[in-house]
Image: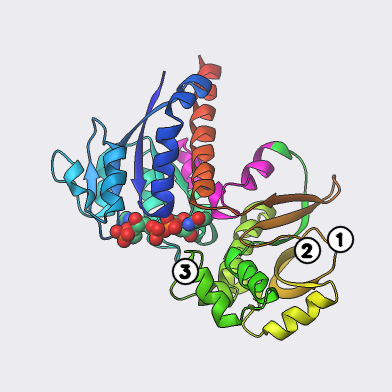
Amino acid sequence: MPEYKLAFIGFGNVGRALARLLLEKRQELNRRCGVEWRAVALATGRHGTALDPQGLDLGRALALAKVGASLAELSPEAAPPDTLDLIRSCRADVLFETTPVNYETGQPAVDHLRAALGAGMHAITANKGPVVHAYPELRQLAATRGRRFLFESAVMDGAPIFSLWRTALPGARLLSFRGILNSTTNLILGLMEQGRSFDEAVAHAQAIGIAETDPSGDILGWDAAVKVAALVTVLMGVPLKPHDVRRKGIEDLSPAAVRSALRAGHRWKLVCEARWEGERPRARVAPEQIEPGDPLHSVDGTSSAVTFHTDVLGPLTIREENPGPRTTAYGLLADFLSAVVGEAEDRSRAS
Ligand SMILES: NC(=O)c1ccc[n+]([C@@H]2O[C@H](COP(=O)([O-])OP(=O)(O)OC[C@H]3O[C@@H](n4cnc5c(N)ncnc54)[C@H](OP(=O)(O)O)[C@@H]3O)[C@@H](O)[C@H]2O)c1
């Protein structure tokens, strides 16, 4: 059975959830997919790096991370402290990139993924930054190196969006999409419907770990715009930057307006959409009053949904209920299996 050496760049909520999922599913992956794995490198921003070609103990790594300790003690010898040096020296087969998103440049994730592909690894990320800032380059580099650049978790966590289009809809053309892609604003709007003030709703979203300390990226619609740009870039084939998306957030919506719409059966939602207009896709993010019967009307809490309009099927809606880091981790695991199972199929075709 092939054994794949894994590097984890980022060991926060998502990196740790992936480690737990890999440990939990180890025997199932052996039995059902014929895949074995070994973690050889771990990198964090402020909690050290670890390297062991013989295999790092992921259970111990999780215990250290839980108490905020450095991962450096897992290494038999000192590991390169610089993430790029670690990537270049770890000789992994697959790299999981889960560092924080940078909306403006996609860095440092773009450099991490570029280095991984350059060193012959499959490069898998949950980070949307590199998708909007470097998709054509990383895709091309992956093709040149016979590797995969995959990012299922970058939009709607582990729900199959990119793989749906890659594998299940051959020959279909995407005409438009419309959805709710930002969990934080959806939760805030729902809490305002229940009587909370805007500030109380934001504080609640922060307290349960959904909104960041500075929630403006969600509230002003930037996170949603990056996701729209990622979908347009990959699924419509036109590289789009977040600034190209017409954007308005939920900052001007008052609880009174939200509750008055609800009394009329309508719900305010932050809607993400894109459609072809002539030769160019036009993309926007803006709050809208959604009528009953619309598939977005019942999307509650941190759930999300997207409806695709194609040239061949009726509207196709994918909906994800209350995702969390485990869901995101599953997207990374699914990408890992797609990459290495595809590799095994290529090998058997060639033999
Ligand atoms: N949370 C979710 O459910 C979710 C869903 C979809 C997508 N995502 C995406 O997944 C990514 C990770 O999210 P998260 O919630 O796991 O974030 P997180 O908890 O903040 O973890 C980020 C990790 O990256 C490390 N890191 C930061 N800079 C680094 C560098 N230069 N080199 C190596 N490691 C570095 C951090 O280390 P230190 O803590 O030591 O600084 C930390 O271990 C983000 O891009 C996010 O947008 C997350």
Tell me if residue 163 is in the magenta stretch. Answer: yes
**Amino acid type at mark 3:** Ala
Q: Is the C-beta of the residue carrying label 1 under 8 Å from the nearest atom of ligand 1?
A: no
Which three-letter amino acid code belongs to the residue tagged 1?
A: Gly
Q: Are marks 1 and 3 in contact (CB under 8 Å)?
A: no
Q: Mark 3, residues whose alpha carbon is within 10 Å: few (<14), some, or many (≥20)?
A: few
Q: Which residue is mark 1?
A: 293
Q: Amino acid at mark 2?
A: His
Q: Where in the image, quadrant-wise, is ligand 1 located? A: bottom left
Q: Residue at x 70, y 74 (%)?
A: 193
The residues bearing labels 2 and 3 have C-alpha atoms spaced at a distance of 26 Å
Start and end of the magenta stretch?
140-167
Image height of 181 relative to 85, above or below: below
Queried whether the magenta region covers residue 27, the answer comes back as no
Assess disc 1: are there few (<14), some (14-19) or many (≥20) residues with their C-alpha within 10 Å of its C-alpha. Answer: few
**Residue at figure coordinates x 61%, y 72% from the top left:** 188
Query: Which of labels 2 and 3 is toward the front?
Result: 3
- Residue under pointer 3: 207
Find disc 2 in the rendering and name its residue.
297
Q: Earlier in the sequence, mark 1 or mark 3?
A: 3
